Image (tube, rainbow, N blue to C red):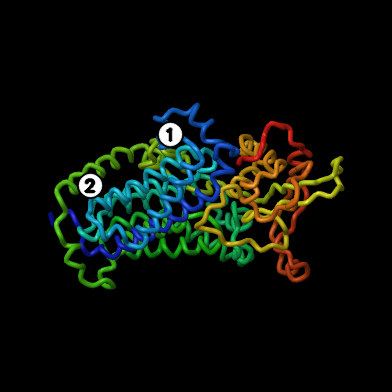
Amino acid sequence: MDWFTAPGYWLGRLVFQRALAGVYLFAFVGAALQFRALIGARGMLPVPRYVRYVPFRRAPSLFQLHYCDRLFAGCAWAGALLAAALAAGAGDEVPLAVAMVMWALLWLLYLSIVNVGQTWYSFGWESLLLEVGFLAVFLGNARTGPPVLVLWLLRWVLFRVEFGAGLIKIRGDSCWRKLTCLHFHHETQPMPGPLSWFFHHLPGPLHRVECAANHVTQLAVPVLLFTPQPVASYAAGTIVVTQLWLVLSGNFAWLNWLTIILALSAVDFTGLAGAPPASASRAAPVWFAVLVCAVTVLVLVLSRHPVLNMISRRQVMNRSFDPLHLVNTYGAFGTVGRIREEVVVEGTADRVPHADGDWREYGFRGKPGEPRRLPRQFAPYHLRLDWLMWFAALSPGYARDWFGPFVERLLAGDRDTLRLLRHNPFPDAPPRYVRALLYRYRFTTWRELRETGAWWHRTLVREYLPPTRLADAAWSEPE
């Protein structure tokens, strides 16, 4: 079956699989370190309560069968260990069937987490990791050549990621059509990085070039992925460069890195890799070929809804059309904020909370807070609480389900919740009251930075949450 495999892509497959396993590693470690406060048995949005109301068919997950924090931690750390082993090349040292089982187990474990993760796992890159991870099951290992059909399916995913994002921008905010969105975006994006301040202060004409280049990369270049080599490789390389620009300018978890990995799978490394090893030219087993063909048909059938969504004037972003997240639609920043608002959470030990009392600010790891603190680089690690705080500032409706429980846990001095924060101003005993204020943030100018050393300037807008005491005396810290 010479038509079935592409031996020349053996190096591209190796790079793709090792890098994808690395992304899985970040995802599982992040889940293991953050889940107790977010979705644990005593978390803000506990899994046991969720699975009581959501049937298995809507959210298939191992945790629909049984849940406890120890089981979740075991699954997350097992996924991290398996991902580390695959990143080190373990999948190429075992028979093809065993390697497929390893990749399938990785996908199943992460699917089980995402499908009970609720708001904390509602981001598009969760579905993207699952979709790409599912296809990786059928990409084979060093004992057979890379299946041509799966390589094309990976390009199909990359096309939908880029083209969908390009369409949502052109159809959405007028600033994308006017080439002015990047006058605001670097400042108002969910979680700026250490270079975002500098990107924001680039000359206005360069921002317009950024916008125009984005349109070309997302609307024209993806079509070239389906052309013969070397044009497809040049198109993939262009996408890689664009994604690296986004990596430098912000913190978007593993979205950019996963897009880069997808693009690398379309690159022809023949000139660099030389002749493929003999094992990569070995004919694929019949059972493997049948499975790959069946998966290809399945993906094409399930692509109907994403395609209809892309061509619709009512296009939506980041939507899964099946509970297994096999074929999804993607997109980002159909609208771009012109101003940045942040929720600042404070506590006080005063017996009577006065507006000018001794209020102390809680420090978050990634989101803007103290004006003199330069934003940090966290991607591809995903700080889920910090991201949701950005949405909370956009509208209290985005935080309706979890912000109250979050405040409650601060008042109780919950250790798991405090571990999600960078700074706890009450290390000895929890505060009597917690309040939240809404501030308007903007990047300082060059002059302000020299004079004050502050990267941000903030102005109080209004009270977001009035001083609140621990209302539920029955709540206690988990053991």
- Left or right: 195, with 4 as reference point: right
Place residue 479 in its image quadrant: top right
User: Disc 2 on helix, strand or loop?
Assistant: helix
Badge 1: how crowded within 10 Å, few (<14), some, or many (20+)?
A: many
- Left or right: 177, with 455 as reference point: left
- Left or right: 203, with 92 as reference point: right
- Rendered location of residue 21, percent (x, y): 38, 56
Q: Amino acid under label 1?
A: Ala
Please, is residue 69 above or below residue 369 in the view?
Answer: above
For discs 2 and 1, the disc positioned in front in the rendered view: 1
Please, is residue 353 above or below residue 281 in the view?
Answer: above
- Mark 2 and mark 1: span between their CA atoms? 25 Å
Image mark count: 2
- Left or right: 2, with 98 as reference point: left
- Rendered location of residue 80, percent (x, y): 43, 53
- Rendered location of residue 248, percent (x, y): 53, 64
10 and 39: which one is in front?
39
Please, is residue 15 above or below residue 166 in the view?
Answer: below
Q: Residue furthest left?
A: 1
Residue 188's disc is none
Residue 292's disc is 2
Whether pointer 2 and pointer 1 mark residues with C-beta atoms closer than 8 Å, the reply is no
Q: In the picture, which quadrant includes the N terminus?
A: bottom left
The residue where tag 1 is placed is 59
Q: Amino acid under label 2?
A: Val
Badge 2: how crowded within 10 Å, few (<14), some, or many (20+)?
A: many
Q: Residue furthest front?
A: 479
User: Disc 1 on helix, strand or loop?
Assistant: loop
Place residue 216 in its image quadrant: bottom left
Residue lying at 52% horizontally and 35% vertically, measured from the top left? 47
Residue lying at 49% horizontally and 27% vertically, measured from the top left? 52
